[in-house]
Amino acid sequence: MRKFMLSALFAVFAITAAFAQSGEDALKNASKSYKSYQSGNDVVELQAAVDAIQVAMDDATIQSDVDAYLTAGDIYSAAIQRYVQDRTLAGEEPIEPIVAKAASRAAQAYMKAYNIAEKSRDQKTALRGLEALQGNISNEGIFAIQDKNYQDSYEAFNTSVTVHDFITEKGGDSAFAEDDTKLNDERYYAALSAVLNEQYDAAEPLFIALYESGYEDAGLYDGLYKVYSGKGDMEKAGQYLTEGREKYPQETQLLFTEINYYLAQGKLDELTDKLKEAIAAEPENVSLYATLGQVYDQLYQSQRDENPEKAEEYFQQAKANYEAGLEKQPENASLIYSLGALYFNRAAKMTEKLVELGNDLTKDGQAKYEAMEKQINSEFDQAFPYFKKAEQTDPNNLNTLIALKEIFARRDDYDASNEMKARIERVQAGEKIESSYFQN
């Protein structure tokens, strides 16, 4: 927070007095404070100028005064310049601007001044103000993106493009006049900000304009995918994604977007190749092994009844990828749990057949029942050490506790099963369990 050497009482009186002024008086005070700031660089004077000009511009009698808009442009320009300087010096220490969106406010003021000016002198002054402001409009957008304030970053970068068009149209000298790449970057960041703020209708024309101009950046295709997927048009989203992947086959950003696309579409067979490609690009990314394991797990479940042989192949692939992830991160609770769940779910599915066999009271039927029960218990036994380690890693994971409760019950260890039940209830009530059951 910006700190001023003022008492709270003085600040309250100053603000109250400012709002009691007429627009004309507030404009005079704004000009006076701004001139004092220019001569002494006292941030308190700049804050006073900002407060006063806001009061002045709210007065309808002032809103046709070209000098008022020029003054507002100068004050807001000084505010953004001061913020850029202070933020640069502050490093990672958070600071607040004197006024939000100062650069965008300054731009709007200068453009309004130009439009209502009757004298060429005032128009030239407004254009000079806009030309000097351009760099700080971009800075405002960059800071807003860094702060994840995507509405303000969209407004800043969109204003930057508007100001360039305005200066060019009025015969001024835009900073982007000789650099189409920089101007398109401003459009791209405006569109990106809109997407990040889920303003897909605002982002769409910006991205399309970039696409039609031949803008060279993989992020363009990622942005177009996000626009159309956000609007529910997955066909068009997929078309732009495919084009982007063909044009930028080495870009992992698009590869991961494609993976999410296939996940959303449920295209599991195609997804395995994409995930293997991603692992080749980022072999240390454990989440990729986990995702590929989950895909094979889903494929296993889909083929379990129709094609047991293929299902077993998928089961082993899921197991291998979970284990590969654990080689990278041996204590990864999610991967440990996933391996346990792989065996647990297979055993749970087998119990459905056990019920059917239980209805066959013949000697052969009973023999099959006992063999199946033995196999089921073996599957649960293989799951147990993974759930045990998962609980040791994260004793508050409900799914782990539920699985352990079931396994203990099947082993007739009702004390342990009841303890898992109690822990489940504690976690569901919002309590945090501090120690693992298996540390007791």
Image: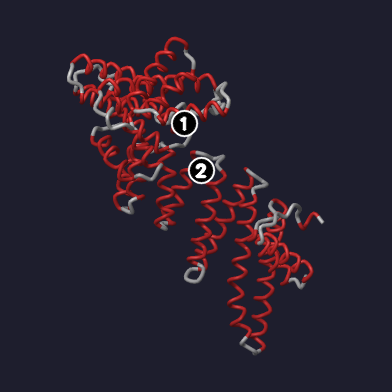
Q: Which residue in the structure is indicated by mark 2? A: 279
| Residue found at the far right of this picture | 440
Q: Secondary structure at mark 2?
A: helix
Q: As displayed, is residue 420 above or below residue 47?
A: below
Q: Which numbered disc, 1 or 2, marks the residue closer to the eye?
A: 1
Q: Residue at x 38, y 23 (%)?
A: 76
Image check: 64 left or right of 142? Answer: left
Q: What is the three-letter code of the residue carrying label 1?
A: Thr
Residue 178, horizontal then vertical, whole percent:
26, 18
Identify the residue at horizontal 37%, vertical 18% (top origin). Answer: 31
249 or 199: nearer the viewer: 199
Counting labels gives: 2
Which x, y percent locates residue 381?
Answer: 70, 65
Using residue 418 as the reference point, say whether residue 341 is left or right of it. Answer: left
Residue type at tag 2: Ile
- Asked if residue 5 lies left or right of residue 27, the reply is right
Give the mark nearer the N terminus: 1 vs 2: 1
CA neighbours of label 1 inside 10 A, class few (<14), some (14 to 19), many (20+): few
Quarter where residue 350 is shown:
bottom right
Image quarter for residue 128? top left
Relative height, residue 125 to residue 96 (above, below): above
User: Gap between marks 1 and 2, in whole Å?
Assistant: 62 Å
Residue underneath mark 1:
16
Q: Is residue 366 above or below residue 119?
A: below
Q: Whole-percent x and y of residue 81?
A: 42, 19
* Quadrant (top left, top right, bottom left, bottom right) of the C terminus: bottom right
- Judging depth in this view, the residue of 216 and 178 nearest the camera is 178
Where residue 176 appears, as percent x and y from the top left, is 28, 21
Comparing 32 with 254, the one in front is 32
Identified at 30% across, 53% down, the residue is: 235
User: Where is the N terminus found, in terms of image quarters?
Assistant: top right
| Label 2: how many Cα within 10 Å (few below 14, some 14–19, many 20+) | some
